[in-house]
């Protein structure tokens, strides 16, 4: 179906596909139960899944760039990811 030239890119894409399957399953469960309380509980679980997948995909990307990018640029990329999570966590 797809020609896989880079295993890291393939792994990143598969993690995103896995994440989308979890999201779709959660949406179906919300519709199945049809209660706001249950939907909020399911959404709370999804709040853990999203950032975890983002961290894993970013880590894989950084591993793939490890030999191609200087240490200082890796520090900037890592700082950017940390700032994203800091910005999300602040009210």
Image (cartoon, rainbow, N blue to C red):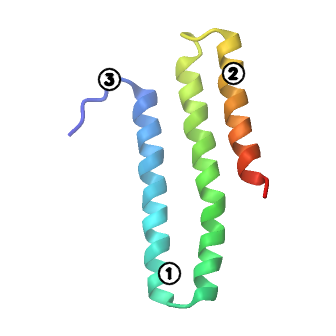
Q: Residue at horizontal 47%, vertical 37%?
A: 12
Q: Which residue is mark 3?
A: 5
Q: Secondary structure at mark 3?
A: loop
- Report whether 62 appears left or right of 10: right
Secondary structure state at the residue bearing disc 2? helix
Viewer-side label of 3, 1:
1
Q: Residue furthest right?
A: 90
Residue 5 sits in quarter: top left
Residue 19 point in image, percent of width and height: 49, 55
Which residue is denoted by mark 2 in the rendering? 76
Residue situated in front as seen by the camera: 84 or 9: 84
Place of residue 31 in the rendered image (x, y in percent of width and height, measured from the top left): 45, 84
Indicate which label's residue lies in the foreground, 1 or 2.
2
Q: Tell me the number on the disc at residue 78.
A: none
Q: Nearer the viewer, residue 25 or 36?
A: 36
* Residue linked to disc 1: 30
* Rendering quarter of residue 73: top right
In what quadrant of the picture does the C terminus appear? bottom right
- Tell me what residue is drawn at x 63 percent, y 49 percent: 52
Q: How far is mark 1 from mark 2, CA to CA?
A: 39 Å
Disc 1 or 2, which lies upstream in sequence?
Answer: 1
Q: Around disc 3, counting alpha carbons within 10 Å, would you say few (fewer than 14), some (14 to 19), or many (20 or more)?
A: few
Q: The N terminus appears in which quarter of the rendering? A: top left
Figure check: 24 above or below 19: below
* Label 3, label 1: how far apart the Cα atoms are: 38 Å
- Going from N to C along the chain, the mark reached first, 3 or 2, is 3
Quarter of the rendering containing residue 44: bottom right
Could you say where residue 17 lies in the image, as x and y percent from the top left?
Answer: 41, 50
């Amino acid at each position: 179906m797809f020609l896989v030239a880079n295993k890291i890119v393939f792994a990143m894409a598969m993690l995103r596909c896995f994440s989308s399957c979890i999201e779709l399953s959660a949406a179906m469960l919300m519709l199945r139960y049809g209660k706001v309380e249950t939907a909020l509980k399911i959404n709370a679980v999804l709040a853990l899944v999203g950032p975890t997948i983002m961290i894993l995909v970013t880590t894989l990307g950084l591993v793939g760039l490890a030999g191609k990018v200087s240490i200082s640029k890796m520090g900037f990329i890592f700082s950017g990811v940390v700032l994203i999570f800091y910005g999300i966590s602040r009210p």
